[in-house]
Image (cartoon, rainbow, N blue to C red):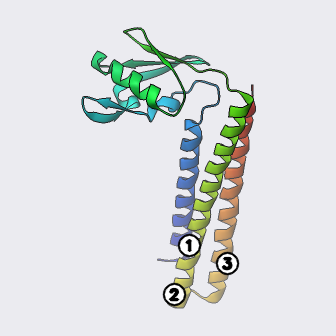
Amino acid sequence: MDTDTTLLDAEERMEKALTALTRDFGKLRTGRASTTLVEGIKADYYGTPTLIGQMASIAVPDSRTLTIQPWDKGGMAAVEKAVLQSDLGLTPVNDGKIIRIVIPPLTEERRKELVKVARKYSEDAKVAVRNVRRDANDSLKKLEKDKMITEDDLKKATDDVQKLTDKFVAEVDKKCAAKEKEIMDI
């Protein structure tokens, strides 16, 4: 293993932290309908916990409505029950063919709670990025200790890791600011 491999590995892992943040943000309710709100909910489908996204087609006919159409009519009640039991606070309406979910507008208080949750997700992503930085720096120090790189190479590589960390932390902050703006938008 050399400095380039260590840097590439660090960048790849930091990218995964950013991807996880984006996925977490997708699950946050912002007052707009989004398929990611319900895709990750598991319904008890013939005794097996199954993701709704794998057992039904989910659509967004307008900005405040979601429709879920299970491929098997037997899964209709399971999907409805799973959405009701989720922590989203949504009420599904089942007409026998399709399940409609109207996304209510968020209250000011709920918006502020969601901003706090978004900030927590952002902080978790930053911690993950910093953990990657620590691991990369430890690998580089081990390379120097094993006499595979010089002290100057270690210093340069450590600076590169820090630049990479700064870049990803800035990206996390940017995504967080955009999500906060989206949540607070009425």
Question: Which mark is on residue 85?
Answer: none
Counting the numbered discs, the total is: 3
Q: Circle 2 sits on which residue? A: 148
N-terminal label among 1 and 2:
1
Q: Is residue 179 visible?
A: no
Residue found 65% across the figure and 64% down from its top: 164
Q: Name the residue tied to disc 3.
A: 156
User: Disc 1 marks which amino acid?
Assistant: Ala
Q: Identify the secondary structure beneath mark 2.
A: loop
Q: Nearer the viewer, mark 1 or mark 2?
A: 1
Measured Cα–Cα span from mark 1 to mark 2: 15 Å
Closer to us: 183 or 160:
183
Q: Position of residue 115 (x, y in %)?
A: 69, 41
Type of residue at label 3? Lys
Q: CA distance from mark 3 to mark 1?
A: 13 Å
Please, what secondary structure does the residue beneath circle 3 have?
helix
Q: Which residue is mark 1?
A: 136
Q: Which is more N-terminal, label 3 or label 2?
A: 2
